[in-house]
Image: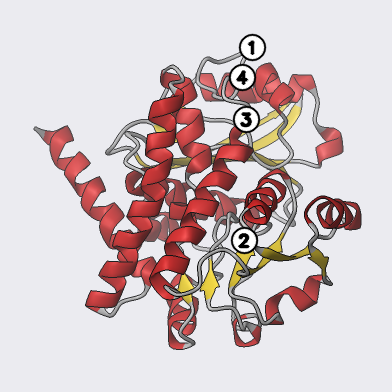
Amino acid sequence: MKLFETVREMGHEQVLFFNDTNPDIKVIIAIHNTNLGPAMGATRLFPYVNEEAALKDALRLSRGMTYKAACANIPAGGGKAVIIAKPEHKTEELLRAYGRFVDSLKGRFITGQDMNITPQDVRVIGQETKYVVGVSEKSGGPAPITAQGVFLGIKAAVESHLPNQGFDGLKVAVQGLGNVGKNLCRQLSEHGVKLFVSDINSDKAEEVKRLFGATVVEADEIYSLNVDVFSPCAFGGILNSQTIPLLQAKIIAGAANNQLENEILHGKMLAEKGILYAPDYVINAGGLINVYNEMIGYDEEKAFRQLNNIYDTLLEIFDISQKQKITTNEASKQLGEARIKKGENQKTI
C-alpha cells in the first residue's frame, strides 16, 4: 500500500499513529472528514495480520462513518480507531494509555465501543478522556437501536423492491448473531418473518433457533439460500466476486460494515443481478444515532425520530438510483456528499 497516495485518494484529513512500549500499544486513528462536526468513530481492538491490514480497516471504516453521519443528518464527521492487539492482551494500562492519546486530540476525534471493546473498557478509557461515548449507556446500549434501524431499512427495501410481499411470510437469512443480529431476529420474528441463520458460534445459532424458531444453516450455505432478504450482520467484505454469483436473495440489507469488498465492482454486480442493496452505512446508522444522542443529552423521542429517518433516507436513495440508473451505493454517496459539501461551505463562511 502506498500510504500517502491511498490516504489522499480516500480523502482523509489526517491519519495518526500512536505507539508506546510501556505498556506495549499500537494504535491508528483515521480522521476522514470534519465538515459537519468532530470525527466520531468507535474503537476496534483486533489482532490484524499486519499493520497494512489495520490501516486499511481504519481508512475504510472512517470514510464510511463520514457518509453514515451525513446520510443520518448527524452533525458529526467520520473517524475510526484500531488498536492492534489480541483481546487476551488487553489490560487497564493499555486502555488508559489509549485514552490519553484520544484526549491529546482535544475533541477532534470522539470514540466509543466496537469489536473486542466492552462497555467496561469504555469506562476505563473514559478515566483518561471525556471524548468517549457509551460510558453510561443511558439508552441501554447501541445494539437494540442499531437492530431497529436495520429492521426499518429492510422494511423500506421490501416496500421498494417487493411491493406486494410485506413482512408476514417474508424469508430472511441473517448472517452473524451477535447483539445486533440477535435483536434483529427478535424483531423480524415478531412480524411473522421466516428466519434462516448462521454464525461461527453454534451456541448462538441454537439460541436463536430456540427463541425465534429460526432454521440454522452452515456458514457457506447462507449465501445460496432461496430467500427474499440476505442480512449480513457479521464481518465486512462478504459481498465479493465469489459470493455474489451464489446469491438468490432479492435484497441485501444488513448491519455489517463495508459489506462490498470493492464498492464499484461489486455494487454493479449486485445491480446487474437485480438485487437491491441497502448501503450499509445508511442502514446501520442506529449505533451512531444512539451514541450521538447520549453525548448531547439523551432524548428518546429525538433519537427515535432520527432513527426513523433511516427508512425515509433509504427510500430516497432507492429513488435516486432508479431515476439516474446508478447503483444504490453511488446514490447514497451522492446524497451524503451533497450534505458534506453544504457543511464545508458553512465552515468557510
Q: Which residue: 63% across, 26% down?
A: 140
For label 2, the SS is: loop
Which one is earlier in the sequence, the residue at label 1 or at label 4? 1
Q: Which residue is mark 3?
A: 141
Q: Which residue is mark 2?
A: 236
105 left or right of 191 in image? left
Return the residue nearer the eye: 99 or 118: 118
For label 1, the SS is: loop
- In the image, which disc is placed on residue 127? 1
Q: What amino acid is at disc 1?
A: Gln
CA–CA distance between discs 3 and 1? 19 Å
Which one is earlier in the sequence, the residue at label 4 or at label 2? 4
Rendering coords of residue 343 (x, y %): 21, 40
The local crowd at label 3, few if under 14, some if 14 to 19, many if 20 or more residues have their Cα within 10 Å, is some
Q: Mark 2 against mark 1, which lies toward the viewer?
A: 2
Q: What amino acid is at disc 2?
A: Gly
CA–CA distance between discs 2 and 3? 22 Å
Rendering coords of residue 148 (x, y %): 55, 45
The answer to which image quadrant residue 17 occupies is top right
Colouring chosen for the image of the structure = secondary structure
Q: Is residue 77 visible?
A: no
Q: Which residue is mark 4?
A: 135
Q: Up-down: is 130 above or below 226?
A: above
